[in-house]
Amino acid sequence: MRMIVLIILLSHTIGMPVLAGERTITWYQPDFPPYVILDPSESQLGIDNQIVRFMIEHLPGYEHRYRTATYSRIMDQMKMQANGIITPLFITAERRRFIHYSKTASYLVLPNAVIIKKTSLPRFQPVMNREGKLDLEAAVRSETVVFGNSNGRSYSGIIDRVIRRHHGSPSIWTRSGSDISAGLLKMLAIDRIDAWIAFPVELRFTARQCEIDAHQFMVLSVADMEPFTPVYFGAPKTPWGRTIVGRLNEVLSHRETIASFLDYYAGWLDADSKKKYRQMAKDFYGYDPWTTENGEPAKSKLR
């Protein structure tokens, strides 16, 4: 009799973590300002910090946890089918094999670029086209400058293709540090690399964070990059992942949600870029996210 009771108790004890795990979401957070800001005093400004808080409010019944890791480590967790969600995330062919993406893009980002010191511009001019954009392929092949990038991060478009094609080249320095931006900017500041591949919006925040004068740098647009890239939520390709992405898709189906997420990002843009960004969003989504179906202004929950 005692043995039967013990077996019953053990079965309940063993089952509890499994059931609890199904109702627990781990939000993976790369150290990636201004998208994900880990500093508690400024995290309310982070684009995806705000997005995650918005989603948590709309996902009742779940326990939410946070885990900080590099993109490379997060992708490893997704391959291991851990019950977690990552944002921001670009779609790539490799990631599609083990990640279940949200159906709708949560927001759009302007393209990654190349950040250099202003004094280094003459070294890059021979590989710039008539429009003043950098021919990244030619620059890497020249082996006269070194580009810094973050391990496991996708930059999208031609940048990803060039990095993949020239893996191991002396012109490509891949950093594996826990932070996405700060380490590479510091390397650029002390001339350990000649260029930092990043979003322009990363420069302002990261320079202030690292107490580095941002005015010494400039941004070079990369030729053949798309004008914007859509950003998605990602979860593991498991029944749990499909279920949770289904819940995310429900929230993303509302214009108010998209308008809010777009505004979180647009808050980091200058006035001219904001105007262009809003038009890009209208073209991409096929409707005006800031207007309801009845033609009234949508209520963006900008925090």
Image (cartoon, rainbow, N blue to C red):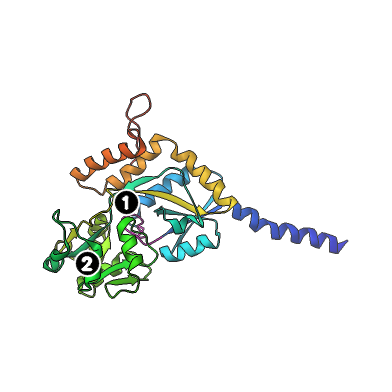
- Crowding around mark 1 (Cα neighbors within 10 Å: few <14, some 14 to 19, many 20+) is many
Look at 34% across and 50% down and name the residue there.
47
Residue 45, numbered label:
1
| Residue 121 in the image, given as x and y percentages of width and height | 13, 65
| Residue 194 in the image, given as x and y percentages of width and height | 21, 70
Provide the residue span drawn in magenta. 30-40
Q: Is residue 303 visible?
A: no
Q: Is residue 179 above or below residue 240?
A: below
Q: Is residue 70 above or below residue 143?
A: above
Look at 34% across and 53% down and name the residue there.
46
Tell me which corner region of the image, top left, top right, bottom left or bottom right, holds residue 290: top left
Q: Is residue 59 above or below residue 82?
A: above
Task: Give left or right: position of 70 versus 283.
Answer: right
Does residue 38 belong to the magenta stretch?
yes
Q: What kind of element bears circle 2?
A: helix
Look at 41% across and 49% down and name the residue there.
232
| Residue 1 in the image, given as x and y percentages of width and height | 88, 61
The secondary structure that most of the magenta stretch takes on is: loop
* Frontmost residue, 2 versus 253: 253
User: Label 1 is placed on what type of residue?
Assistant: Leu
Task: Give left or right: position of 40 versus 79.
Answer: left
The quadrant in which the C terminus is found is: top left
Residue 268, numbered label:
none
* Frontmost residue, 174 versus 244: 174
List the residue tagged with mark 2.
139
Does residue 165 belong to the magenta stretch?
no
Tell me which corner region of the image, top left, top right, bottom left or bottom right, holds residue 203: bottom left
